[in-house]
Structure formats: structure tokens, C-alpha cells
Image: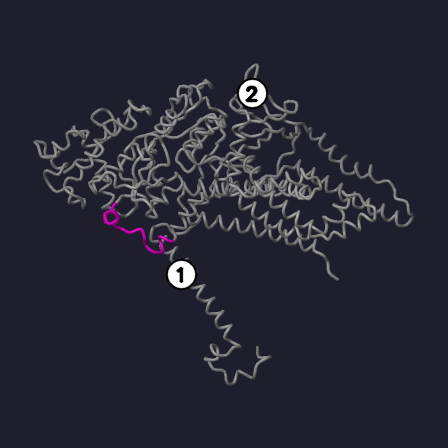
Amino acid sequence: MSKNGAPWQENFKFSMLLYDARYRGLTIQISVLIAFLLAFFWLANNVVQNLADLGKPIEFGFLGDVAGYDINQILIDYTAQSSHGRATLVGLLNTLLVAFSGCVAATILGVIGGVLRLSNNWLVSRLVAGYVEIFRNIPVLLWIFVCMFTFTALAPSPREFRGADPEASMLFMDSVALTNRGIYIPEPLFSRPLGNIDLGIFFVSIELLLILACLIGGWLFVRKNNARALQIQNDTGERPATFLVNLAAMALPTIIILIALGFHIGKPELKGFNFKGGINMSAPFIGLWLGLTLYTTTYIIEAVRSGIQAVSKGQTEAALALGMRPGRIMSLVVLPQAMRIIIPQLISQYLNLTKNSSLAVAIGYMDLVSTLGGITLNQTGREMEAILLLMAIYLSISLTISVVMNWYNNRMKLVER
Amino acid sequence: MRKTILLSAATVAGLATGAASADTLSDIKERGKLNCGVTEGTLGFSARDASGKHQGFDVEFCRALGAAIFDDADAVEYIELSSKNRFSGLSTGLVDVLYRTTTWTFSRDVDLKTSFVGINYYDGQGFMVPAELGVSSAKELEGATVCIETGTTTELNLADFFRTNNMSYEPLPVGSPTEAKALFIEGACDVYTTDASALAGVRASLKDPSAYVILPEVVSKEPLGPAVRHGDNAWEDVVRWTQNALVAAEEFGITQANVAELAKGGDNPEINRLLGAEGSLGEMLGLDADWAARAIAATGNYGEVFERTIGESTPIGLSRGLNALWTEGGLQYSQPFR
């Protein structure tokens, strides 16, 4: 500041903070900041003080207490004897699962829909437009209800699979059971399992790690092999055949390991009241996932459409002039440029979907809000702590998504020279 | 959930301004009506009738309080609270008293800073299943899917019951009784579990009640009673003794029909004290001398309330069982009026 002013140290007066245009802005900003912090501190202090007076000081010790309730979808070990903290973790993983599946499905559907929206076929583009207008103009909570309750009302209950001449039967060669409690799909099983590695809070199966290692190894080999092929092509003009070698490198080790471990498929079977075995995608999960996906897809369709339309028509025409087919024009010329406009909008849609997943509580999907903010909150009566923790966790999830997507955005950005 | 968050926000606001005043009775008198927290719809305990008015067992106790305080049983505003937001509703001062089929437990009494002032219904958790499943005992429910209202003690009892009997089950948590009913009818769950009294109400409201059976096991103690905020003993006394007055009235044979006659005074000093012909019990509570007589005139005694709302002559069809007077082998007992 001293650079552009007179030698002010000597005749600086306090009144200059208010009357000197050089300092006035700064003075005002600092006073507002102080006032804001004071107000915030007053509120926070008031809450802490009053809760303490009520005999409910803010403390998080309840997270270590026994939860006492069961959860219907668990991705890690959990029993009613686990702690509230553990229940929170189970809920968090369920939130992440539905958010991730929702984002993936919405992106795939959204890109397809966005391209169809611009189709020259009148019927196709009108149908997509109709879908967009209907789904995005009705609150997502209602769509979640609709998905959940049509699913439970239309799908047969497990009872109907029973008896000599059942009213309902399993699909795909008796391997998939579609019931109104969820869809039971076959699960991979190993007859000679290697056990698990204990990572402290959860277990990782050694089989999964082995298979992942094979796939990554295969992929590294494929990269190297392709580079070698490119080198030979550059040197001699002849590209050696790589496809079969690559395929073998990717698939063979995995297949050998699967056979060695005794891989087989476990089909769900009706036992007692419910199907047993297989992986159960529960009705609340399907309802929530469908509802969130169908709703968010509409926004992604619009994002993709706007991105494509923003790419100048000259690009398409130039590609046509070079003799490219329409499909390749879309995937090689238009979409890569459109992505730069689409990605920032995608980020906010991913964030929205993740936050909307908290509506799970309405249909009994045990996400973070249903466990920590629902049953735990009610059983322990720690409203303030539970809500603060919920806010902190959602904030971290959103910021993480934001950071990752912004990194991706920066990579995809047009490099200006 | 949104409600809970809103209420929690309201807690903050309420705390900051000190809205939850310590003298509830004067607040109520100043306001001119009582705010009573009830369920969103449990047939028999509190549900809206065809004309939109709240009716039921718990509602009658709110009406008795209204009559005791204002001499007007209708000076009550019913605020429907879900099982999740009931305690925040009470602690923020949204309701003055919670007559919401709430189980009196240690942690709620001690840790949630609510005060339970009595037990108006001794209940226990039961199970209902469709008759076609052919289940005759809750011990046969291995592997069943169970619809359960979240935020209730039933959730914990359920986990305990299945664990002690070494059985597995799939919980399907739902937010409200109506939702639970819909999922249960569609067969999304095999079993519906909640307090046995509420189960009877749900069963009565189904299209074909005989197609559903309530299993004989009662797996928990669920003493249901009114709750008030911790620390306002004067208001706590009003709620406790109004309920006691209805129970005592049954014991003394005071009914809606003869209360006016008996209030003029008679030979039994305890009846005289209760109805205000003798002594100054009403004054000690901060109410008029005839507070109990007004409450009884508005709703009838405990037995009359029971028979009219959930008794054997109603569609709910509950027998008195544990809720008979202590003189008849039950647990309902009023502390003496002296």
C-alpha cells in the first residue's frame, strides 16, 4: 500500500481510516467481518451455553454406545450390538453407494438422452423433450415415492413364488428373483476361498485383491504392448497384430485364478419367508436409485444438449467434408468439445444427486440421514450433535466430489496457447 | 426428517430467546388453549374422524386437561407429531404435554430431559401377520421381513427379541403408520410390529381384518403415558393429578352421568375433596376448586374413556387386561386425594 501513497507513516491519523478513500474500503470490510464473526460466535456460544444449562452439553461420546437397532442393507459388518459410530459408517457407505450408482446411471442415460434430444427424428426428439419436461418439473421426492410404491405394488411378493403352481416365477433361468422386497441377483462364490484381510474398520477379500491385481497387470501389459506396436508401426509402417495377445493378457490370468479358487455362481433360493443367497438389491434402494436417476438424468440431458449446440456447426460440416460418418463425428469431434461445457454442469448435478439422496429417509433406505440423523438421533436424543455431524459429513462428501470433478475439468479444458 | 431438522433449528432459535418458559400453566392460561401433542393417526388413540376432529383415547386425556384448566374440553389444539420429532416438539415448547403413545423408559426420562407423569395405558409390543402364512408364534418368524416404525422403542425391542431367540430378520423401516400399513398389505413385509394396542387399531382399519392375526407373544413392556418438559413441577402436577382424577373417579364410581350430583357434596370425604366440595386441592394446583369435576364431566372416568374409545364394544376391541383398576386385578391405580 505504501507504494502508491505518500509517505503516510509520518502523518497518519486515525480519522484517515474513515475519511481517506484509500483506507475506507478496508476499514468497512474489516468491521463487517468482525461484526459477522461476533454474531456467529454469539449464536454458537448461546447454543452451547443453553444446551449445557438444559443438562445436554454438546458431546460426541454417544457414538461409542451400543446402537441396538438393525440395518437392512449393510456393506460392512454390522450387528445390533455395534456402536452408533459404526451405524453411522454403515449409513455413510449406503449414501455413497446410492449416490455413486445414481451418478453413473444418470450420466449414461443423460448423454444418450442429450444426443437423442437433438435427433432429426421428430418423434424421438419430442419423446425425450416430453420426458425432460415431466420429470424435472415435479419434485424429486414425489418421483422417489412413485418409483418405490409402483415397485412394491407391481412386483410379486415372495409368497407368490411358493407352491406347486406359483403365480410368479424367477427370471433368466431361475437365477434372478424379482420381488417387491427387492431384486435378488446371483452372487459370485468361491469354493476354495482365501479369506479376508482385516483393515481395522472393514475386511477386504483376498480374492478380490488378486483379481484386481491381475486386471491392473494385464492393463499395464496392454499399454506396453500397444506402445511397442506403435513404435514398430512408426519405424516400419507395418502394425503387428496386438488384439489376441492383449485379450489373452487381460483375460487369461484372471480366468486361471477364478478356476483355481473354485469360482461358481450362487443363485438365490426361496427359503422360509424370503429368498436366501444371491445379492439383494432392496426395494428402497431400487426406488431411491430409480427416482434420483430419472430426475437427475433430465438435467444432464439438458446439459449435454446445450454443450452439443454450443459447438459451432462448422465443426460438424468440416468433419462431414472429410468424409466422417455421423456417429464418429459425434464421438470424435463434437462430444470432446462439448464436454468442456458439460462438465461444470455435471459437477453441480452430481452434488445435487448426492444431497438429494438424503430423501432416502422417506422410503426407509438406511442412508446417513436414516441412521445417524434418524434412529441414532431419536434413540440418543442428541439432536444438535447428530445434525452438526451430518452437516460436516455431507459437506466433506460434496467438497470431495467438487475437487475431483474440478481436477477432471481442468484436464479436459481447452489448452490455450 | 425435514421436520426434525426444522425442529432442531427451532430448538436453537427457541433456546436463544428463552421461549421455553418455566411456567407452563400460566403460559397456557394466557394463550387460552392447551397445545397437546398426539400421533398422526393411530386409530383408537388419536385419529381424525370423518369431520376432521381428533378422536381417541389419548385425545380424551387432552380434553380432560382442557376442561380442568378452562372448563372447556375443546380449548385444546392438537398438534400431530411423528415418533421422530415428538421429543423435540416437546422440548421446544411446541406442545405443552405429549399424549402420544409414548413409552416411559429410563433414557427418555433421564437423558432426554422429559418427565413422564403417569401411565394411561399399559401396553406391550406385538406382531401381526397375514393369516395365510399359517404362523402361530413369533418364534416361527425366522428370516421374515418386518415393517417397523423408525424412531420408536419397538425398533430396539425387535432387535433384542430376534437376537435372544437366535433368529434373523430383515427390517424394513417406515416413517409413519399409514406407510407401514400400505407396505404390509402389499406384502412388502411379512410382519408388522408395533404396540399391541396400535396393532389392534390397524387391524380394525384393514379391509378384511379376519385375514390377519395378531400373534400371542408380547415381547416388551410398553408403559404409555403423558410426558412434559423437565423442570416445571407445577405443570407436571396438573397433568399427573388430572389423569389420577379420572382413575380415582372410576374407583369411586363417579361417572359422567352422576358427577354433577356428587359434586354437591356427600358422605365420602375423598370424593368431596376430589370434586371440590371440601378442601382446597384445586387451589393448590393453581386451578379452580371444581377442576376434577369438570374433567370428569367432559370425558367420563377412566373406564368410560377406555370403553368409548378402544374398549371391547369398539372396532378396536381391546380388553381391559392390565389396564383394569387395581381393585379388579389390573395395574391402574391413583394416588390418594388428600
Q: Specify the segment rendered in magenta.
A: B13-32
Q: Chain of mark 2?
A: A
> Closer to the N terminus: mark 1 or mark 2?
1
Element marked by disc 1 = helix
Q: Which residue position is annotated with label 1?
A: A42
Which residue reaches farthest top? Answer: A164
Give the residue at mark 2. A161
Q: Is residue B19 magenta?
A: yes
Where residue A311 appears, as percent x and y from the top left, is 71, 52
In the rendered image, residue A338, in percent from the top left (x then y), is placed at 70, 50
Q: Residue B108 at x, y = what percent? A: 35, 41
- Mark count: 2
Q: Which part of the image, by quadrant, shows the C terminus of chain B?
A: top left
* A9 lies above or below A79: below
Q: Nearer the viewer, residue A381 or A398?
A: A398
Residue A352 within the segment the image draws in magenta:
no
Three-letter amino acid code of the residue under disc 1: Trp
Q: Secondary structure at mark 2?
A: helix
Provide the major secondary structure of the magenta segment.
helix
Report the front residue among A320 and A298.
A320
Which amino acid, mark 2?
Phe
- The local crowd at label 1, few if under 14, some if 14 to 19, many if 20 or more residues have their Cα within 10 Å, is few
Crowd around label 2: few <14 · some 14–19 · many ≥20 (10 Å): some
Tell me, yes or no, whether the two marked residues, 1 and 2, touch with CB atoms within 8 Å.
Answer: no
| Distance from the alpha carbon under mark 1 to that under mark 2 | 62 Å
